Image (cartoon, rainbow, N blue to C red):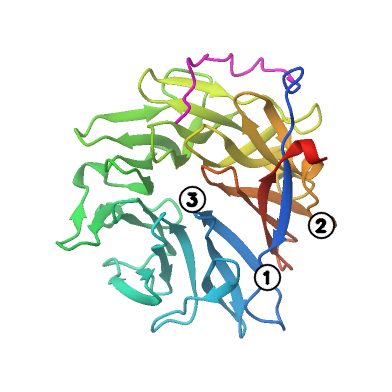
Amino acid sequence: MNRFARYILVGLLSASYVAPATGASLPHYMVVDLGFLDGHNKDTLGAAINNQGEVVGTSVLRGSQHPFYWNGHIHDIGVLNGTSGVAVDVNDAGTVVGWVDSPQLFVFENGQAVGLGAPQNSYDFLSAGINNVGEVVASPAGDNQCDASNTPFVIRLSGGPSTPLDLLRCAVAVGIDARGEILGHVFLGAGYIWGLVDARDRDFDRFGKASSKISSSTPIAINKITDHIAGDVQIGFNHYPVLYNPADDKLLRLPPLSPRLTTGLARAVNSHDQIVGTACHSTAQCDGGNHPFLYDPGIGMIDLLSVANIPRGFAEYVAVAINDRGQIVVDASNPPFGPNRTFLLTPVDSSAH
């Protein structure tokens, strides 16, 4: 797996537009619309993709949100005993993790959804992730709530009780890698959010602590092979996507997508340190006119609207997931009421173009 040979700590207030590397070959993509569960309400939003190209997310069925998985065709996972739900992650074995209202955590494998229980207190939703050895990390989440029931927990699908992570109180876990290392963020004072990496030896790394210019930071996705993390830092009123290496506490701030789209949000990273997300004119108003981006270490920032035939006419575009094969999931939406559609971008040989 490729890693950066080194990380450069960029001056976080002085970054300027950087064009793709001279002579670098831009990727090209075949675009597939993932479809929808209900022909009367054509609304779908993707969330994650595995290395087999299977996508999970949420679609509307009979007026309520249902978790789905896509493996060439879209399938309804169902909502157990609830009324709505979402799928949030999928591992390479095709095991899906998500939650239904209550909220109740579930996994879906071998064509069957199984409930894993619910937190003690009532929360708006659950944050969850799954790794390739069948470990699920989850935590209740809400509007900056902070009490003991915020404690994330790990469930081993092979058996055994869930394990609370007592040293991560008031935290939200968002991912887990194959070595059991956990990515999350914790509420510190005044609602500020800082990243936290929970290694197996419980060595907590505070994401972005090296710069006093950062008012807050949020890790979004963990590279499940390495320890590298995609996330965002806040400077002033805006957010900027970064790549973080906890081994030496270095942040690489990604260059702007264009002179007009200078801020943005990271959403996912693969084992090659390729990052996807959305680029905006201002993340204080990142709710229209934003473009999906791919950051490639050998090329730089790439506007996916310029290299893939994604249908136009939506208010905003967000690249939400990428796998190690370079397949990308892009959500195109018209908030707040839709319609929303999900597209799978698969790299094709650029020499054919």
Question: Residue 286: x percent and y percent?
Answer: 70, 45
Residue at the image position 38 percent from the left and 32 percent from the top: 227
Q: Is residue 221 magenta?
A: no
**Can I make out residue 149 in this image?**
yes
Where's the C terminus, which quadrant?
top right
Q: Earlier in the sequence, mark 2 or mark 1?
A: 1
Where's the N terminus, which quadrant?
top left
Question: Residue 176: x percent and y percent?
Answer: 34, 46
Which of discs 3 and 2 lies nearer the camera? The answer is 3
324 vs 295, nearest the viewer: 324
Determine whether the residue tagged by mark 2 lies in a helix, strand or loop. Answer: loop
Name the main secondary structure of what is drawn in magenta.
loop
**Residue pointed to by mark 3:** 51
Disc 3 packing (10 Å; few <14; some 14–19; many ≥20): some
Q: CA distance from mark 1 to mark 3?
A: 20 Å
Determine whether the residue tagged by mark 1 lies in a helix, strand or loop. Answer: loop
Which of discs 1 and 3 lies nearer the camera? The answer is 3
Q: CA distance from mark 2 to mark 1?
A: 13 Å
**Residue pointed to by mark 1:** 35
Q: CA distance from mark 3 to mark 2?
A: 25 Å
